Image: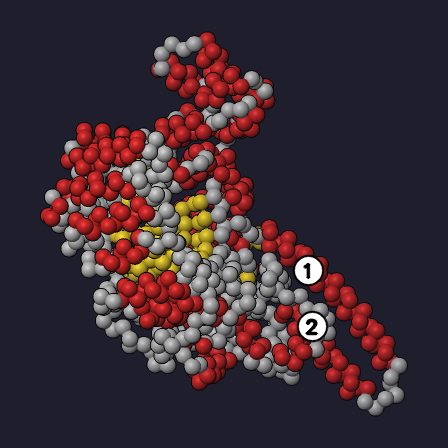
Amino acid sequence: EAVLSAAMAAEGPRSLFALSAAAVSCSMGALEQDVWALPGHLLRGLLPLLSIFRLERAEDAARRAGLSTQPIWRKLWDDVMKTRPPNSENITCWRKKFLETFFSNVLHGVLDISSDWRLNDRHFSPLLHSSPHVSQLTLCNMLQGAVELTAEHNQKVLENLASSLQILKFQHLLSSDQSIRHSLVLLLHRLIHHGSVSQVSMYSWPVPDTVLLVLILSMSAGYWRSGNALAYHSSPCGLCREEDKAQSQESAQEQAERSCYNEREHSDGENQKGSPRAPEEADAEVNRRGADACLNSALSRPRSPLQNQACEEGSSKVTCDPVGFQGGHSRCVSSQLSCRSALRKPRRRLKPAAGKKRRCLRRSRELYADPEDLYDFVFTVAREDNSGLLDRNSATEGENADHWTSSSSGSPCTGQAGCKKRGSAGIFSLKAACRFRSVSTLELFSIPLTGETCRTLSNLLSSWVSLENLVLSYNGLGDNIFCILSGLRALSHHSDCHLRVVRISDVFSHMPCMELVRCILSAFPQLHTLSVSFDLKNQLEGNRPEGNPSCSEVEIPESCLEQLEIRFPREPLHTKFLLPVLKASKSLQQLSLDSATLPCSQELGLLLEALKECNPSLKKLSFHDVNLAEHQKEVLLLLQDPVLQEITFSFCRLFESSTTEFLSEIINTVKRNSSLKSLKLPGNRLGNHRLVALADIFSEDSSSALCQLDVSSNCIKPDGLLEFTKKLEGHIQQRGGQIQFTHLRLFQNWLDQDAETAQEALQRLKAVCSVVNDSWDSSQAFADYISVM
């Protein structure tokens, strides 16, 4: 109260209403319900005087009174955050934006709530009150945020986050000790396994802590071990405990039913004592019941791909406890009954684990897990009884595979294609873990992945059926790309695979771009978006591991692909290699080709013919850093295409060797095209005079429907922009104010050379359309546009 009074006193004399509103604001604890019932004109003056906690609680009352709190939250942002958020024009709810950022800043200690009276209210906890509005959270450095969120006094905060949080990001992580990793385990288990987090993204980790990285990856995929690893303040996870209780009750009921069945069998046996074959038949029945009980116990729990594979191979041993990886675990093994025969004659209806929300495995009373071994499972060599099966599978797959894409779904990374022999240290043991809920989006940006990490990721991908979006960007994969592809191929064998978006980018390519595209698309014809991007060509490209022939002959089934982006590392664009992809992608709507070279003058014409024949639904076509200076005919053909709605020629040297007639032909072609909505021409040396000429696209005799024009990075000066504006205004006046032009992009032009003229031009333009520009310093640019200076 004193702080608010001091703040008001500093502002000078106030009206009687303002003084009364301030007094009410100081007594909101007692008057809150009465205040919410005030008329709208009174409530309007009171809302700006509330703390952020009271203001958030006033939202319903303000809505009933027909008031919006958005201007107040926007002013709070400007006063407290003092920064302009990215894409601010797209923010629809400033309340959510403010409270989400407020939560993050308080959590990481970068905001002092005592600095502003509106942030400090002794009746409210900052983290607890703002947590329901947090849908995206970034943890960084030493993961101090994870430690704070899993502290006992923040249990309610964590519960709120489990319901609201959708995106969890990690940035600039550093190595951490075991206590911090333990806090991270608790956090991930609550937010992913028992929460609503659907996306995990990791950024900028130049030297990743392998244990920490694999921990995040494995828990994102839904894997973790039971026992003390999931203890929360010395007690098991409450949600797991509830599931365990329900599962125990179910098991007890099954045990009771089994006892009744045994009693009936025993009674029947007493009546058959005279038969000489009775003892043998009774023993066989007991063995069969024991095997069935073991099988029921095993199949009632989630199964890993390795266990499924063991069943398919007909192993002579059936392990009932898939958690069995530490000493002291009880196992039930039948050496006389294979999985295959047991599956053919089940004694009771088995309950599959796949396709439902997986339960935690019931922890046995005999289970022992040393806290010091909490993270051992990450790099555990499989030591189960059927570990030898892995080597046999590797040999079998090597003999039967026609190429790398034929690897078994149960064993994605088996020594082929850049992957070392399975079983080496570092392979994630799926058998040693429980299966929980997993995320649907995984993004890794600028995080080097070693061979060991790639094999672990491949193993996880092989059964990650909930994964919908995979982004691997600048991870230094090298020949480990084959290991990742092997895991993806294994994933494609699952009928319930949900993968729809794959984006792979790196500095060096270890295989030709088109070959990688064909490999991925042949395995996942259900993909909607595929992006492959490389900066440089690896000089050793083509030296693939033995037994991994080229994918260039792989047949591509008809696909659902809608968006294809390829960035060639200065590779020649051969239409004959792209043609099979285009033919298989009848639904293709967006195609982007970047940094490709055209081996001959006819190549672009062949591509356009292929697009017209194979992709009638193509709406957006983009060329970036492709030299089109000698392809004026093809450029004009694209601009008059009646189907394309967006065309991009970015840094394509369109006017490098052109004449004035070529620019006139472009303008006249666009004027006649009523389907083209967006034309993007960044980095094509337009200069002032060509920009002014482009204004004729909107002349009175034009039938163009162009809405967006991008002329970024084109050496445009303020006087040229002003002349363009005046000419555009004249055309609009001639057309009676009827024009569809709505957006103009002007990034990285020379508008700083005459600030006054530029300001005049921009103000007049903004009365016509939405203008997006920046305060770029042209003095820092290279003087490589001499021809238009």
- Near-viewer residue (101 or 543): 543
769 in relation to 397, above or below: above
Q: Residue furthest front?
A: 701
Percent of width and height locating residue 502: 41, 60
Q: Which residue is mark 1?
A: 248
502 in relation to 137, above or below: below
Q: Residue furthest bottom?
A: 276
Residue at the image position 33 percent from the left and 33 percent from the top: 735
- Near-viewer residue (294 or 619): 619
Which quadrant would residue 209 be assigned to in this image? Answer: bottom left
Which quadrant would residue 12 be assigned to in this image? Answer: top left
Percent of width and height locating residue 521: 42, 67
Label 1: how many Cα within 10 Å (few below 14, some 14–19, many 20+): some
Residue 428 visible within the image: no
Residue at the image position 60 percent from the left and 50 percent from the top: 238
Q: Which residue is mark 2?
A: 293
Percent of width and height locating residue 730: 26, 32
Quadrant in the picture for the C terminus: top left
Amino acid type of the residue that numbered disc 2 sits on in the rendered structure: Ala
Amino acid type of the residue that numbered disc 1 sits on in the rendered structure: Ser
Residue at the image position 68 percent from the left and 56 percent from the top: 246
Which quadrant would residue 723 be assigned to in this image? Answer: top left
759 in relation to 514, above or below: above
